[in-house]
Amino acid sequence: MLRSLYIQNYALIEKLNIGFEQGFSVITGETGAGKSIILGAIGLLLGQRADVKSIRTGASKCVIEACFDISNYRMQPFFEENGLEYEDECILRRELYASGKSRAFINDTPAQLAQMKELGEQLIDIHSQHQNLLLNKEGFQLNVLDLLAHDEAILSGYQAAYKEWKDAQGELEKLLERAARDKADEDYIRFQWEQLEEAHLSAGEQQELEQEAETLSHAEDIKAGLYRADQLLSNDEGGLLDGLKDCCNVLSGLQAVYPAAEELSARLESSYIELKDIAQEVAARSEQVEFNPARLDEVNGRLNLIYSLQQKHRVGSVEELIALRDDYALRLSTIHSFDEDVEVLKKRCDGLYAEALRQATGLTEARRAAADEVERQMAARLVPLGMPNVRFVVEMGGRKEPGIHGMDTVTFLFSANKNGTLQNISSVASGGEIARVMLSVKAMIAGAVKLPTIVFDEIDTGVSGEIADRMADIMQEMAGNGRQVISITHLPQIAARGRVHYKVYKKDSDTETNSHIRRLADGERVEEIAHMLSGAMLTEAALNNARALLDSAQ
């Protein structure tokens, strides 16, 4: 239930703070006084997009805040799922800044607009004249049936089965597309694979071949260098090893008279052994290195093959070529197994489709039962609203393929006249008739859905007199059982029926115009309703008529 509304710097409202009560309330005021502004502000709390143009001229930001009593509506799951703190009093707040920035809060916790919209849809329903157009939409008509059928579990089960079938169908379509594409490219894929396979690539070979090519290209220089090093180390005429050996012998001979020479001799002996080993390896490598033009051509040929494959496939290593070769092999293998995979997935799709149809059948049965109830309730509600010969029929048809909402199509057929032909309601109902039909639909839904607050924005357009009284009866009925109903109206018959009466008005100062709203006292209600009856000029007859309307309403 909406308990209070605070608005600051929004459109023509400088500051507004008003409380609301349970039951049936009415809001009146002249056209342009600001009733739509208040509804627009509430709409922002329900997640509607903000426009900086709505900020009051000269203000840097505007604030809209509403307090709701949600203690009786079991909304804890929403708060838990969204990580929000639950309290019996829920506060929604929007802040709009002239810079274009917008902020939303639920119980003083920053929130996303999607969260605010989801919560707002559970708190308040604003029915304006343009919502009458919903009667033309099949989705709305189907939703009415589902609400009356209380088929949430059946619908949820069907939609889960439908989604699983659609997902599998999507997989099948992708597999078929890939199969067609790869089969068309099979010759190309096979050629690429065979070329890479015939190359007999091995990991690391490119680095080894590049090093070997470098060695073979400089074989003569390498061999000459190794020979020179061998001569310096092992030459019989003054080679390094011979001199080092003589030095070792000299130090060894000094050990008896000079003990320190022992360590030096040992160290030099160790160096001699290491150098001798190096000399032997240099000599061996010198014998191994030789200029081999044939092998160089072979290595360069192999490298050229690798380089050309890398350039062709736009990769930089043998390892990437090997990965590409294996991928081509996998694609060829997959092409051969496509038919089998497609057959398996087709069988799965068929099974899921059958399950979706089975679930849809249960949904259709629940809706058909609800359709009978809708027809009964709508006739019972519309006859007292000045349609004694009304016929209201819910026509159900079937779809060729399942949709997200099932296999059903729904059309509301209507005739207000005796022996009139039943036609789509949007084709035959007048504006006044549409308003009465929509009010009846809302009243019927209200009996099935526990929505705390319902706001009717001039739903009474196009009706008057006794019909207005009947519409007021329905609104009062809807306001029972702890529900809050607020009607913005131009009809005195409806205004008189409100338990609480608010008036929206504009007031001019020297520099600006402000919109205000206030609760009327009993005496003020008489004058307001009298003005609604007679216009600007108050007459005693109008005042007496207003008192009579209020007395009869009580």
Image (cartoon, helix red, strand yellow):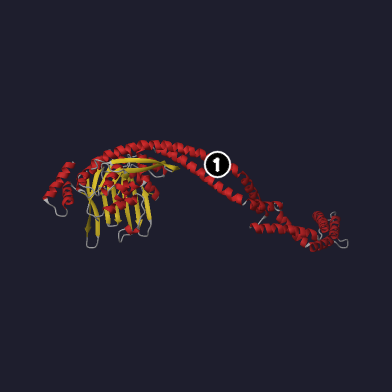
Work out which quarter of the rendered image holds the C terminus and state it: top left
Please identify the residue farthest to the right as the structure is shown: 236
Badge 1: few (under 14), some or many (20 or more) residues near its Cα, within 10 Å? some
Work out which quarter of the rendered image holds the N terminus and state it: top left
Left or right of 218, for residue 73: left
Q: Is residue 356 above or below residue 107?
A: above
Question: Residue drawn 17% across and 44% down?
Answer: 550
**Closest to the observer, 494 or 116:** 494
Q: Is residue 15 above or below residue 398?
A: below
Please identify the residue farthest to the left as the structure is shown: 540
**Closest to the observer, 429 or 219:** 429
Q: Is residue 19 visible?
A: no
| Residue 300 x/y as whole percent | 74, 59
| Residue 410 x/y as whole percent | 37, 42
Q: Quadrant of residue 209?
A: bottom right
**Closest to the observer, 398 or 187:** 398
Left or right of 520, for residue 438: right
Residue, disc 1:
345
| Residue 9 x/y as whole percent | 30, 56
Q: Is residue 543 visible?
A: yes
Left or right of 105, for residue 285: right
**Closest to the observer, 48 or 392:** 392
Q: Give the number of marks.
A: 1
Three-letter amino acid code at disc 1? Leu
Q: Quadrant of residue 308?
A: bottom right
| Residue 89 x/y as whole percent | 32, 43
Q: Is residue 292 above or below residue 71?
A: below
Mark 1 secondary-structure assignment: helix
